[in-house]
Amino acid sequence: MEFPMHWLIILVVVLILFGGRKIPELMRGLGEGVRGFKEGMSGNGPKGTPPAQSASSDKPAEDKPQS
């Protein structure tokens, strides 16, 4: 299997932009984002908790200033 040249160019550009130390942090953040997206799509919150209710129904009525 031959390694396509465009992947090598992309890898070099990523290394130049982010540096070797930032790449693990970048991948960790990407993994957490994908995990959160999958949990959101399944309808569960983090760690299997049910999704929170809409904040608009819990919002108290705004007080009007007295003049």
Image (cartoon, helix red, strand yellow):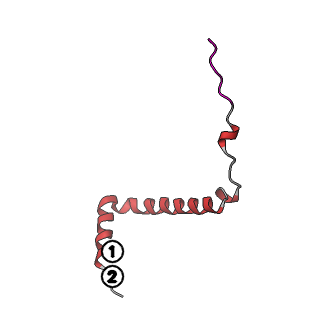
Q: Is residue 20 above or below residue 52?
A: below
Tell me if residue 64 is in the magenta stretch. yes
Q: Residues within 10 Å of mark 2 (few under 14, many from 20)?
A: few
Give the magenta part as a residue range.
61-67
Tell me if residue 18 is in the magenta stretch. no
Q: Position of residue 36 (x, y in %)?
A: 57, 59
Q: Is residue 62 left or right of residue 10?
A: right
Tell me the element at label 1.
Answer: helix
What is the number of the mark on residue 7?
Answer: 1
Q: Position of residue 49 (x, y in %)?
A: 70, 56
Q: Amino acid at mark 1?
A: Trp
What is the number of the mark on residue 3?
Answer: 2
Residue for point 36% across, 88% down: 1
Q: Residue furthest bottom?
A: 1
Q: Amino acid at mark 2?
A: Phe
Residue for point 64% across, 56% down: 46
* In the foreground, 57 or 42: 57
The part of the image, by quadrant, that contains residue 26 is bottom left
Residue for point 68% across, 29% down: 61
Residue for point 62% across, 11% down: 67
What is the number of the mark on residue 58?
Answer: none
